[in-house]
Image: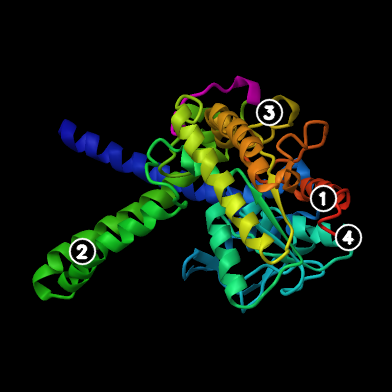
Amino acid sequence: MSWIKIVFINVIVLLILLILGSLALRAWDAFITKDEIYQVKDFNTNTIRATYPNYNEYERKDAINIFTDFAAPRTLYSPFIEWRRDAYTGHSANIEEQYKTRLSYNHNINHSIWFFGGSTIWGTGAKDEETIPSYFAKASSLDVWNLGESAYTSFQEFIQLQLLLVNNLTPEVAIFYDGVNDSIYCNTNTLTLPTHMREDEYRQIIEKHPKHKQIIDKLTEKADQGYQLGDEIEHIYNKVFYFFSEPYAKRLSGFFDNRAMSTSYNKNLSTSRPFSAFEKQHHYRNCDTDEIKAQAAARMTVNTWLLAYDLLSTKNIPVLFVLQPTSHIGTEFHQLDYLLDSEKQRIVDEKKSYEAQYAMIKKIWAEECLKHNACDNFLDLSEVFNGYQEPIFIDTMHISPNGNKIVANEIYNYMCQNDQFKVC
């Protein structure tokens, strides 16, 4: 028997053993293991957060539903503000049809307290009745409207405010909850302001659309059957490779964090090292090293707030601007070891840039608010969690319901102390 034939037979035997091993591991994951992580087929960097200590008092199924509902609604194009989640009915999250906004405790659209913000206001990691607007409604007994949407910047929120006012809707008070999403202005590749999180994605879709149409046309022609077949073979190969390699990569990711097969299974599901073990590796945000960019980023936030203030003042509608907490600020005071390693790395990578951005926002606001007589319309909650020992963050910036309640009570108490808001 030639050596080539021997090698060939051994390779075939090895592949068969690897395939059988992969199937055995999948069977173990599906039917035998008691580890809840492997019992849930859809665990990923979204739903894995349901296992955090923040949700120890929840039934595991309820906690998982929170994050499943977060990802479930479709996202649709919305004129001027770019996108919103579609109407949705779920276990823990419900989105109404007309304005595509999430329901709250004491939900009311007109003549209520309007909350503008990103995904933290929308309520990532919380049920409808556990969001910041809902906890505010419970504390104040007032009607609220949750206008938060994932990834919204303060400028998108300002545009949304104008759209609602044009439709003859009027808030009793408007609250803008910002800071984290405006950090996009600190990205090293962000040159034009303002912008939003999906500018590059949308631009690529628009620019590539004619090419996509040409490809589709070619795939329908008989002359291109060879290309179509090759493309399909590659697609099938990738799916087959993923199916058989994923069980091995899942286990390797926990033991060899830096060498895990991230192309087959997301190594970022690993929580293998304490937060203190991480060092900065990436420099995709640079407000800490580029003061001009830090000033430009901060001015985008402050100028947007002041435009909203001036607009609402003409209608005698009070407005409050809240600088939101994030794990990047006062990091040493937060429990973070339970987070995914990928989240801990992001916090370390972004920390200095956030600190520079937030410091500049506060500096510029202090200078500009005097010109508008608006200094009392600002609440700095960037360090609001520093005195708490309980786990609050579920990633770099989102917080669990206990954090939402703290924030809502802080906002309510601040507004109670200021007569212009008339909430008490």
Residue type for callout 4: Ser
> Closer to us: mark 3 or mark 2?
3
Q: Do callouts 1 and 3 mark residues in contact (Cβ within 8 Å)?
A: no
Instruction: Residue 416: give its label.
Output: none
Q: How far apart in space, not on screen, are marks 4 and 1 (Cα)?
A: 12 Å
- Residue at the image point whose x is 53% and y is 58% from the top: 156
Q: Main secondary structure of the magenta part?
A: loop
In the picture, which quadrant includes the C terminus? bottom right
Mark 3 and mark 4 residues within 8 Å of each other at the beta carbon: no
Of callouts 3 and 2, the N-terminal one: 2
Please provide the residue range marked out in magenta.
275-285
Q: Which residue is labeled 3 in the image?
A: 331
Q: Is residue 274 visible?
A: no
Cα–Cα gap, marks 1 and 3:
20 Å
* Residue 140 disc label: 4
- Vertical comparison of 283 with 213: above or below: above
Q: Kindly identify which residue carries mark 1.
A: 405
What kind of element bears circle 2? helix
Residue 339 seen in this snapshot: yes
Residue linked to disc 2: 211
Task: Please state if 250 lies on the left or on the right of 225 as rendered.
Answer: right
Q: Quadrant of the N terminus?
A: top left
The answer to whether the residues at label 2 and label 4 have Cβ atoms under 8 Å apart is no
Look at 57% across and 40% down and name the residue there: 269
Residue in the foreground of this view, choosing between 160 and 6 = 160
* Residue 221 falls in image quadrant: bottom left
- Residue 243 percent location from the top left of the image: 43, 52
Q: Is residue 356 magenta?
A: no
Real-space Cα separation, disc 2 to disc 4, in angstroms: 54 Å
- Label 4 sits on a secondary structure element that is helix
Label 4 CA crowd tier, 10 Å (few <14, some 14–19, many 20+): some
Q: Please, which colouring scheme is shown? A: rainbow
